[in-house]
Image (cartoon, grey):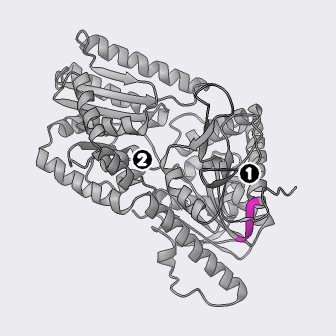
Amino acid sequence: MRLDPRSDESPVVVVANRLPVDRVPAEDGGGEGEWRQSPGGLVAALEPVVRSSGGTWVGWPGAPGVELEPFEARGLHVVPVVLSAEEVADYYEGFANGTLWPLYHDVTGEPVFERRWWDAYRRVNRRFADAADAACARGATVWVQDYQLQLVPAMLRQRRPDLRIGFFDHIPFPGWEIYSRLPWRREVVEGLLGADLVGFQRGADAANFLRAARSTSGVVTRGSVIECADGRQLRAASFPISVDAVTLDELARRPETRRRAAELRAELGDPETVVLGVDRLDYTKGILQRLRAYGELLDAGQLAPPATVLVQVASPSRERVEEYQRLRNEVEVTVGRINGDHSALGRPAVHYLHKTFPKEEMAALYLAADVALVTPLRDGMNLVAKEYVACRHDERGVLVLSEFAGAADELRQAILVNPWDVDGMEEAILRAVSLRPAEAARRMRAMRRRVSEFDVHHWANAFLGALAMVAEAREAQRRGGERPPGFSPGRALGRPAGGR
């Protein structure tokens, strides 16, 4: 069935699990409230692209059973996709986050393979594809986002061969030995093969996908190029996402932000060293391993409160899922043990905050922290690392970064660490705490240059530019013509599979 949200169909359509706006209730409790821009780098990057092109954003409004007509919000045309409570449980909490999330993060949690979840995933992906199809003008560019919607590219390709289709995977893509456990491995790969360009955070992820494509679908690959059965050439490459560096830098420079940073240090007791962790409460983020390393440093007397304090922000996540409830309990018990052993009255060794803060407060926290611990067990990118760097206009602060985060490919001046190695974590924390100011400033300057040059807008432009070149080459090949002027495989591919 073809939907018709508006007659003047869009030249650019972004398809994502969530809409770029959230409904905020009215302050007086009456009426429908208003729609405000959702937080996060993805919306900041893509909203200007969609708005300037007169495009459309397709996504779920965030609440089950909510039926809305397409509408305009903040100058954006948005098309809501309805999900029932059962579909949220099976498609989103089930297959996306109970099967794919742990599998794609190197089985840091045990994935569950449930046929009912797969059926819901396929059904919901079809609904997103229907909505995108209806929104697209002829020859439109469609950019599908992330692991929740991996079947959409092929579903769109089947009915709309005129479209230019890109897909970006924001989380890791696992090696074949792990990916091959998925009972529906072929269907997922073939869903992605419907795109013209598939983007990943790291070259290694692109290489993993290429191997999965060869192993499941029998396609032929040449470097980063996949020869599809229908004669198309699909390309897979890395396009590392980033943050809105200019906006974060400006926010951190505001007098009120700097005053708040000073207030935070005073509230913490004016310690010599503030160590900061900022994570979503998820088992992939390595919070327990980090707490263990920090606790052992306190046990050994190598660090001591109140001279050194740890602030751990753990934003609530998937609180209805049993595994996440267990993780929260483990984290809170660990924090309680450390504080019981090492805190003084009114001066906890670990300040644990299970809540989400506005961006203004986060910028102040980043400025207040002498050391940032970004130590996930596995992460596609981890934008906290780049946010911390973007906010440090004073060129102070030391970043301790997991080598298993995509950000480690770019922020090489951070102190890199294996978060599974508790001894190595302890050494990295001690090194960060004692790093000479001049050395810390040298490292921060280099990382800030990287984050500033390759910001989130560069990421969006690079991907869409590569998609246009790949699609133009395909269209020229189909017409029997030559490649478009200026086309080169290297330019169109982003970073080669397997490279940095």
Residue 199, located in which quarter of the rendered image? bottom right
The label on residue 344 is none
Between residue 311 and residue 28, name the one nearer to us. 28
Q: Mark 2 falls on what kind of element?
A: helix
Q: What residue sits right under mark 2 in the picture?
A: 383
| Magenta span of residues | 135-139
Quick one: quadrant of the N terminus? bottom right
Asked if 53 appears above or below 5 in the picture, the reply is below
Q: Earlier in the sequence, mark 1 or mark 2?
A: 1
Image-based side of 378 in relation to 335, left or right: right
Please rate how many residues cluster around mark 2, counting C-alpha atoms within 10 Å: few if below 14, some from 14 to 19, many from 20. Answer: some
Image location of residue 28, percent across then percent down: 60, 25
Between residue 136 and residue 333, name the one nearer to us. 136
Q: Mark 1 falls on what kind of element?
A: helix
Determine if residue 424 is in view: no
The label on residue 128 is 1
Asked if 76 appears above or below 221 in the picture, the reply is above
